[in-house]
Amino acid sequence: MIRIILISIIFASLSVNAYAQEKLLPRELASPVKQAQKFYDKGEYAAVIRVLSGYNGEDHPVRHLLMGHAESQLSHWAEAVREYEKALELDEEYRPAGLALAQVYVNMDKLDNALKVAGKFINPEKAAAGEVVFYAQVAYQNRDTRLCGRIVRSALLRFPSDDRIRKLDLALLMEEEEWGEARKAAMALLEKKPIDSALWRQLSYVTRSKDDGKTDLAAIEAAWLANPGDRDLRKQFFASQLSAGHYATVISESQKLLASEKGKAIPLDIETMALLVRAADGASDEGLLKKFVSLVPSAKRTREMQICVARSALRNGDVKGARKALCALIEKGKADGSAYLWAGSLAEGERDYAEAEADYAHAAKLDGSAARNATLYLARLYWNTKRPEEARNLLGSYLRSYPDDVTAWAMDKVFKAQ
């Protein structure tokens, strides 16, 4: 399962005015701190570091706290860690430095460290809602779902209307595969915020899992409509509609999309274009399929697109067009055994025996059922082109590898009878 909770930055307000009031500053440090605070408020973080690093008097945790904040704003994470740790060396219970240190560890993707520090400085029974959410999110992202669950259960009692807690609860229910309760939790959140596309996406996942894999098409559509600019949601919507056989819906929505202001960018999204080609192929709309494929540069056309083009050509009785599409696939190195087998079969049907032999031989070297079939097709080709010894040798070798193949034994019987 994709883990959908992102850790929020809850210590973005990094002024130290209130912190300085908590702890009496040495007289000689008060002026540098005041000056550094002015620089900080103006966004001149390098000046903060310059002023405070030049101080040589009696030390104080506030000095390192403010320097750590300045380093954080400059994304100097290692330097920020060093300053916060110095603040904690001077006062191991100095909570502002501990909270800031936990956040920096999150920014560094050191979740083990972040969880350890957060656990020391955040008491879920007493801390503010934002701090509790942060602690729970770090636990969740660190895959400590038991700790996260304990924090969330406590938080639900203290902050029953906090949607951040409710979303964490939903995530945990999904982790535990409690689909019924997860659906209730998702619906409750959507009642408050019906345009939250992430929630609709979760609801579709929950519903699909609850209903043995049947995708909730309405939930996915609602997710996309709530955030039509989300490319991933758009692709999920198209894919779910295709799986349900709703080709007309995909075609209709895609034409609206292509006609919109953002339509010019759609052909650059190859995954989306592949879905549109599939829809046109499924609907047997040859003109639209040709149009969709033409929007994609030939070098970027996928294997699936070329297969759809080949199928379309055959539906129109254009064998040469189908062969051309498969040949393009082969030339790009994107053909699998079934594509080679299909290309060989079309070539054989047009009496292009040299090309058919080459395609069958290539397919036979690959893995899977297509390779086995290609070997039999090649043996048949040898026989039909008056090369009986090669046909019998190839079939004999095949039967030694696959002695239970009934079709091969039937061919062997024919070969021996003539």
Image (cartoon, grey):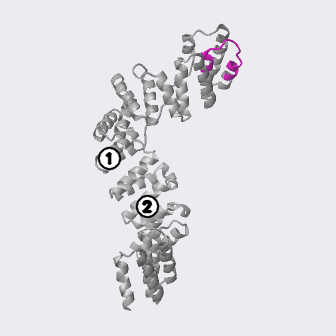
Q: Nearer the viewer, residue 240 or 353?
A: 353
Q: Quadrant where the C terminus lies?
A: bottom left
Q: Is residue 351 magenta?
A: no
List the residue tagged with mark 2: 277
Q: Nearer the viewer, residue 320 or 376?
A: 376
- Marks 1 and 2, the one that precedes in the sequence: 1
Q: Secondary structure at mark 1?
A: helix
Q: Secondary structure at mark 2?
A: helix
| Residue 338: quadrant of the picture | bottom left
Left or right position of 42 against 139: right
The spot of residue 149 in percent (x, y) is 37, 31
| Residue 156: quadrant of the picture | top left
Q: Quadrant where the N terminus lies?
A: top left
Give, as a single range, the part of the protein colored magenta. 49-65
The spot of residue 305 in percent (x, y) is 46, 63
Residue 76 at least partly seen? no
Q: Is residue 50 magenta?
A: yes
* Measured Cα–Cα span from mark 1 to mark 2: 28 Å
Compared with 21, 341 (above or below) is below
The spot of residue 105 in percent (x, y) is 54, 31
Residue 232 at least partly seen? yes
Residue at figure coordinates x 67%, y 25% from the top left:
46
Q: Label 2 amino acid?
A: Val
Compared with 235, 391 (above or below) is below
The spot of residue 272 in percent (x, y) is 46, 54
List the residue tagged with mark 1: 209
Mark in front: 1 vs 2:
1
Q: Residues within 10 Å of mark 1 (few under 14, many from 20)?
A: some
Q: Nearer the viewer, residue 156 or 388?
A: 388
Q: Label 1 amino acid?
A: Ser
